[in-house]
Image (cartoon, coloured by chain):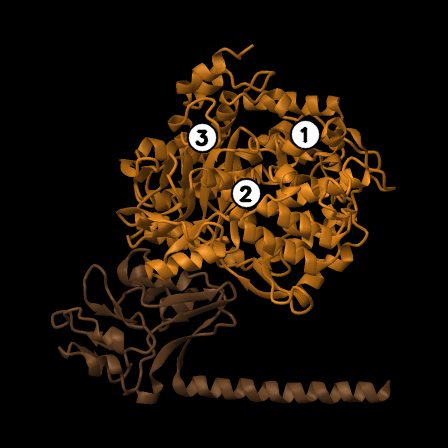
Amino acid sequence: MLGYAGKILYLDLTIGKSYTEKLSEETAKKYIGGIGLGMHLYLTKSKKGTEPFSPENPLVLSVGPLTATMFPTGGNGHAFISKSPATGGVGESVSHGTFGTELKRAGYDAVVITGKAEKPIYLLIDDDSIQLRDACQLWGRAPSEVEDAIKEEIGDFYVRVAAIGIAGEKLSKIACIINDKTRAAGRTGLGAVMGSKNLKAIAVRGTNDVTIHKPEEFFNLVKEFHERMKGPATQKYRTMGSTENLMQQNSMHCVPTRNYNNSHFELAENISSTVINQHFVAKIIACNSCAMRCEHEVVIKDGAYRGTMARIEYDNLWAFGPNCGVDKLNSIIKAAERCNYFGLDAQSVGGIVSFIMDCYERGILTKENLDGIDAHFGNASAMLSIIDKIGKREGLGNLFADGVKVAATKLGDKAEQLAQHIKGLEVTGYDLRCLKTAALSCAVSFRGADHNRSGAVTIDLKGKVDRLKAETGRGKLVKDLEDQFNIIDSLIVCKNAKNTFYKDFEEMTKIYNATTGLGITQQELETAGERIQTLAKLINIREGLTRKDDTLPWKVMNQPITEDVPAKGAVVTKDELNLMLDDYYQTRGYNKQGIPTTVKLQELGLSDYLELTETKEA
Amino acid sequence: MTTRYQDRKFIVSDPEKCSGCRLCEYACSMANEKTFNPDKSRIRVITTGPLTNMAVSCRKCEDPVCVASCPKNALSQEENTGIIRVNEHSCTGCGWCIGACPFGAINLHHIKKIAYTCNNCTDIDIHADSKQKNEPQCIQWCPKNALQFITSETLAQKTRQKIVTQLFETRENNNSNKEKNQNS
C-alpha cells in the first residue's frame, strides 16, 4: 500500500497522550483519503449530538494518497474535518500549499485530535515525536506571525505550520485555519474548533520517504499532466487568475451584488482582473509540486495601505467587492489581508458585512447598533471597521462574529430574510437565482452554501443546460459532479486543475493505482465518490439535519432579479426547488426525506450505519 | 576531448521565475534516491516570504572550500565537470564541509550519514528517454524554466546581454516618450 503513510495518529489534548493505528487497506480503498477518510474517522470517533466546541468533538486533519508525490497539484493538499460550529453538520475544508506534504512525510495519513489543553499550546509533529508545546506567547497573534515564531523556536526552516488567528481563539464561527501564511482551510468555521481546544497551531516536519508503486507508469502520467497544465485547461488560472470570472459573470448578470439586491455590479470594471494584474499582482506563486502555479499575490503600492499583501481570487474579490458594493481595490485587498490576519473566512466575512449593510439601508440596524459606523453599501472604510470588530469580537463583533445565521436569529424575521446562507454557511459569488443547477447543488451541499461541493455552477455558466430552468435531470448532473468532487477532495487534487483530467474517473483510477498499487477499478472509485457523499449525509442526519435544511436563502426564493436582462424575474420557487430535490434524492437512492435507503447503504458498504437511518426511513 | 575548467556547468535559479513549487526537489530525490523526499534532494528551494523563492544547489566552485575543509580528504572535485565527489568510506559525516560551503549546497544524508551534493544526475541511468540528454532532472522538470544548467562564462554572457538590452530598451522608451511629449 504505497503512496499512503499507513498510519493514523490519535491525540488527546486533555491528557496529552497519543497513539497510532494502522490504516487498513480496506479503509484506504473505501474512503481514499482527504475528506473521505477524514469524515469516516470523524463519524466513527464521535458521538451523536457532540457540541462543536466540546472537548469530545474530534478535529480530524488528513492528507491524500497523492500528497507529497510529484503528481501535479496532487502533492500538496490537506483537509480538516469536524462538526461545523456554523452548520451543526459536517464541516470540512481543504487547503493547499506545502503543509500537507510534511505531514505525509512525518508518516501520517490522518491526525485525530480530541480533548482540550489546559492552556494554549501548539502541536509539533516531528516524525515519530509528538509534542505539545507552550503557546501562551503565541496567543493573540496572527497566523503568519505564529508560523515565523514557531520556525524560529524549532530552528528548522522546513517546519510547516497551520495556525488560527484571534478569531479562532475567540470561537468565531467563521474562523479559518491558515497554513503557509496565505492559504486557508476557510469554510465551516473549523478555526474555532481548534480554538476551543486551546490549540493555536499545528506544526509538522517529516523526513520519511514517500514511495510509489509503479514509478514508470506514474511518471508517464505526470508528464502528460504537466503538458496539459501548460495548455488551455488551466489558462485562466495561470494568466489572469480566477478574478477573470468577475467580468464574465457580470456580463451574464449572475454576480450577486449588494447582498443579492442586484445581480450585476455596474462598477465591476474598476476591480477587474485586468486592473488587478496591471497594478497589483507582484508575483504568481505555486503550491508544492504544481506545474501551473496560480496564486496571485497582490501588493498595494501606494496610499494608506501601502505594502499590504494578500492573495486575491474571485471568491474574496467578490465577497468584499460587488457583494459589499465596494469598487476600491486597495480596500478589498486590505480586507483580504485583515481576514488572513484575524484568521477569518473571507467569504463568510464578506457575507456578514453585506448583510449588515443591507440591514442598515433598510433601517433594521442603525448607527447606534453599529458602534457609530455608517454602513452604507459601498462604504469601504465601514467595511474595514466592521471586519476589525468581528476579528476582535469587539462591540458589534459580539453580534456578528458568528455569521449571518446567528446574527439574523437575534435580529428578527426581517433580518432573517436578508441573511444569505444555507445551513448557516454564507453564500458564495454566484447568483443562484439564475444558475439553477448550482442552486440545487448548493441546497444539497453537505457543508452548506458552497459552489465547491460539485462545481455544477460551470454547467450553468457554460450554457450546457438552460440555467434559468429547473427540471428533472439536474439531480443526476449534480450527483455525478459531487461524486467526482468527493474524489478530488479525497485524493487530494486541486480543483483549479480539474480540467486537466480529460476522463475524470478513468484517469483518477490510473493515477491512484500507479501510486498505491491497490488495483481498484474505475467503478470502485466512482462508488467511493458516492459513498463519501452518503457518509457526509449520514453525519448530517445523525446531527439532526433534515430535508428542510436542504434549502436556499430567502432572497434566492423570493426576490426576483430586477435588471432588464434575460434573467429578469428569475427566482428559484419552492416548487422548483422541491422538483429538483425529489429528482436529486431519487438519483442518489434516498427517500423523499433525503434519507439514504437501506438498500443504498448496503450497496455502498455502509450497513454499519443503518441505525442512523432506520427510524427515519418512511 | 577534455573539458576546459571554464566549461563546468552548474545549476542556477532565477528568483524572478521561481514559483516555489519544489518540483526540482522531487525530481532530484526520485532520480537519485528512488523516492520522493526533499530531505534527500541535492537542490533545495528556499522561500523567505510569499514573493521570494529561489532554489540553491552546488555551484561547482573553482576552488571548492568543501574539499579544502574536509579533515579526512573524503571530498574531491572532478576535473572535467567540477562535481564534488564524496568517498563514502572516508566520509565520517562530521559536517565541516557543510559549515564551509557558503551556499548551504552540501548536505548530510540523514540515512547514510555522509555528505552528499549535486552530481548533475550523472550517477543515474535515466537519461535514456530524456529529451535533453545531458541535463539534470531538476532542469528538465522546472515548469517555469527558472533553472539553468550553465557555465560561468555563458551565465556572464547572458547577464551582460540582458542588461545591455534592457539599457537600450529603456533609452528607446524614454526617447519615444520625449517625442510624444514634444508632439503633444
Between disc 3 and disc 2, whose residue precedes?
3
Q: CA distance from mark 3 to mark 2?
A: 16 Å
Chain for colour orange = A
Residue at 52% across, 19% down: A596
User: On what subunit does the disc labeled 1 rest?
Assistant: A
Q: Which mark is residue A175?
A: 2
For the residues carrying marks 3 and 2, which lies nearer the camera in this image?
Answer: 3
Quarter of image, res A446: top right
For the question of whether residue A552 can be seen, the reply is: no
**Image chain in brown:** B
Q: Position of residue A122 (x, y in %)?
A: 38, 47
Q: Mark 2: give few (<14), some (14-19) or many (20+) Cα within 10 Å.
A: many
Residue contact between numbered discs 1 and 3, judged by CB atoms under 8 Å: no
Report the residue at 52% width, 42% height from top: A170
Residue beneath disc 1? A410
Decide: is A425 above or below B164. Answer: above
Q: What is the three-letter code of the residue carrying label 3?
A: Ser
Q: Nearer the viewer, residue A319 or A191?
A: A191
Q: Which residue is mark 3?
A: A54
